[in-house]
Amino acid sequence: SKDRVEVAVLGKRQERQVDNTQAGIEKLAQWMQELQPELIVVEATGGYQRAVVEALFWVGLPVALVNPARVRQFARADGLLAKTDRLDAQGLAEFGKKMQPRLYESKSEAGKQLSALLVRRRQLEEMLKAGQSRLRTTPQSLKSSVQKIIACLKEEKKSLEKQIQHCLAEQRTWQEQTEILDSAPGVGMLTTATLLAELPELGKLDRKKIAALVGVAPMNQDSGKKRGRRKTKGGRGGVRSVLYMATLVATRLNPVIRAQYQHLLKRGKEKKVALTACMRKFLTILNAMIRDRQPFRCPASA
């Protein structure tokens, strides 16, 4: 939480609280080093977990960051309906033992900076949309006040985009990947930055795993003879929203994605369904490009 970290050790009846401050986190890291656990599971709590996870990671401890919704569903399946911080800590330990979540991989300092810039840009986008919606119902005498704020937000957004571009350009490890991704019609600077910062697994996983990670893999809804409608669930929302816009552009400019989109529409698929399928196809292509370190190549028949 904001003020403290609740800790439980599986099978040892050890429970402890430490302050969620630098001094408290240092004590926690020292205790964990003495304990030498097989796995430390930390719940994502809106940013309050970041310092804890980074501290444990950098002293060489095996730490996993998990979605609280998954842990809560696990607790309910285990018959635990009550909820307190202490019970949650115990539940995290049980979840870690039985589910063995993937270990946390820290970003580089440049990666953290790029992620922060992208988050701030998304915040500005939301404020801009709110301001533009508000402008429609604002009295004429007050419109200039709202317009000033909108103009200021637009300028700040442009400034952030320049910083993002500069961040990409100054990192040698990203330069080659940027050139590869930018070669695909439909991919712009923001798409490239988001993929590099928020999807470091790109090029390291197979097409099914990367699609599931982003949240564009269709999930079965079958039971007996019933064949339910496939739906996409979960995944990384920030990456998915950027991929959606890139795919929307690609349905016009990218010959491979355009051909698939038109083919799906001719088969009677709804536009939303066709676009989701194209998102998955586009992600698969980008994943292969980074894996093989090859730029986009248009098939001769396209």
Image (cartoon, rainbow, N blue to C red):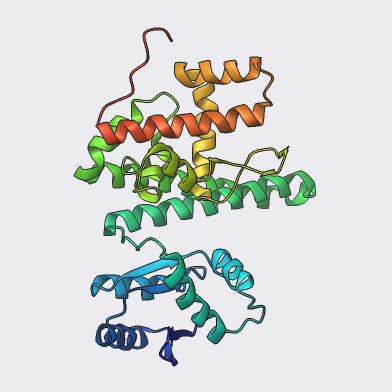
Q: For residue 116, what is the image quadrant? A: bottom left
Name the residue rendered at 47%, 29% in the picture.
Answer: 281
Residue 101 in view, yes or no: yes
The location of residue 82, given as percent across then percent down, is 66, 82
Name the residue rendered at 41%, 37% in the picture.
Answer: 207
The location of residue 90, given as percent across then percent down, is 50, 82
Name the residue rendered at 38%, 25% in the picture.
Answer: 184
The location of residue 95, given as percent across then percent down, is 48, 71
Residue 1 in view, yes or no: no
Residue 255 against residue 233 in the figure, above or below: above
Residue 78 lies left or right of residue 270; in this view the side is left
Residue 97 against residue 207 in the figure, above or below: below
The residue nearer to you, when weighing 61 against 230, is 230
The location of residue 140, given as percent across then percent down, is 78, 46
Q: Residue furthest left?
A: 172
Name the residue rendered at 29%, 43% in the picture.
Answer: 168
Residue 245 lies left or right of residue 112; in this view the side is right
The residue nearer to you, when weighing 6 against 144, is 6
The residue nearer to you, when weighing 242 against 103, is 103
Residue 163 lies left or right of residue 272; in this view the side is left
- Which image quarter is the C terminus in? top left
- Give the total of numbered labels: 0
Residue 254 against residue 3 in the figure, above or below: above
Q: Residue furthest front?
A: 224
